[in-house]
Image (cartoon, rainbow, N blue to C red):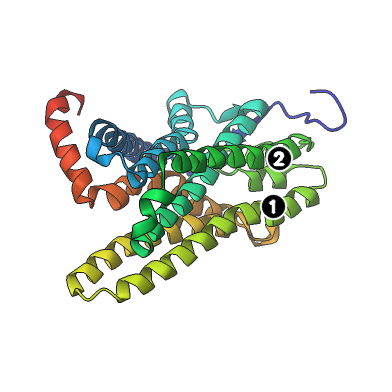
Amino acid sequence: MRGSNQSSVSEFLLLGLSRDPQQQRLLFLLFLTMYLATVLGNLLIILAIGTDSRLHTPMYFFLSNLSFVDVCFSSTTVPKVLANHILETQAISFSGCLTQMYFLFVFVDMDNFLLAVMAYDRFVAICQPLNYTTKMTQKVCVLMVAGSWVTANLNVLLHTLLIAQLSFCGDNVIPHFFCDATPLLKLSCSDTHLNELMILTEGAVVMVTPFVCILISYIHITSAVLRVSSPRGRWKAFSTCGSHLAVVCLFYGTIIAVYFNPASAHSSEKDTAATVLYTVVTPMLNPFIYSLRNRDLKGALYKMVPRRTFFI
């Protein structure tokens, strides 16, 4: 590459999760199993929602979008990990690294926005049931999802362009299993203060605002549920909210730990463990937590699977 603001490094080396051959084989099988479970579980959710007219409601519309995003989310990192193991290589090109990072963060942002939109949908359904059909129209739902895609792409484009302007003239080894912003900033021989400032300000606003919306929605939902006279009704609502909030805390907690701490507070081992949780484990668990505990969706899956048994 040429130019004072561009990199002399043509590729990076992804060290992965372990250098021990036996551990690498175990991790390969583990990642392959989790990835197949993620793809199969989320695609089944999408098919069930698409084929059952009873599930053509705002809640399931958002859920199908979340499942689609989760498949894409895992697909940005796990296939590359598996391919590197099979091909016995650790290399990824400079442009490939930036591309992987771009799509990874787009899907992180989309997960973030969709979790907030789903919380708002439940808030309207539980706290304002008489206004639900007028507030959550098909047009409003589509605009929410479309707006989320536009915002996510613009946000990530900003950070990707800023990283593309950095110089990488020395070490090209990334102690990670995918291209991430934090290790790239550590490898740069340019001044990264602007990048870190944008992550801690603009990036934080994009991540924290939906999180605050989720908290506010669930505070109102909890208040409404506590006024329900039936103990069974209260327990059912709290159980559903508890599962959702557990995944929200896992998702946001790991992201905050990795991306919204000063660079001096990071360690490659802790960052890698946290990113495995939100890039691999959370997308795999989402179909079970959000969907398979749902009676209507279970019914749709039971009707669909026997007719498509040969796919499984």
Circle nearer the N terminus (2, 1)? 2
**Residue at the spot 38% in from the left edge and 74% down from the top edge:** 223
Q: Nearer the viewer, residue 312 or 59?
A: 59
Q: Position of residue 117 (x, y in %)?
A: 46, 51
Q: Nearer the viewer, residue 172 or 298?
A: 298
Question: Is 76 on the left or on the right of 9, as rendered?
Answer: left
For the residue labelled by badge 2, is the local secondary structure a helix, a strand or a loop? helix
- Amino acid type assigned to the residue bearing label 1 in the image: Glu
Residue 202 tag number: 1
**Residue at the spot 42% in from the left edge and 56% down from the top edge:** 119
Q: Which residue is mark 2?
A: 158
Q: Position of residue 136 (x, y in %)?
A: 41, 48
**Looking at the image, residue 269 lies above or below residue 161:** below
Question: Is 244 on the left or on the right of 255, as rendered?
Answer: left
**Residue at the spot 78% in from the left edge and 31% down from the top edge:** 7
For the residue labelled by badge 1, is the local secondary structure a helix, a strand or a loop? helix
Sort mark 2 into few (<14), some (14-19) or many (20+) by Cα contacts within 10 Å: some
Q: Position of residue 32 (x, y in %)?
A: 35, 35
Q: Tag count in the figure?
A: 2
Residue 171 tag number: none
**Residue at the spot 34% in from the left edge and 39% down from the top edge:** 38
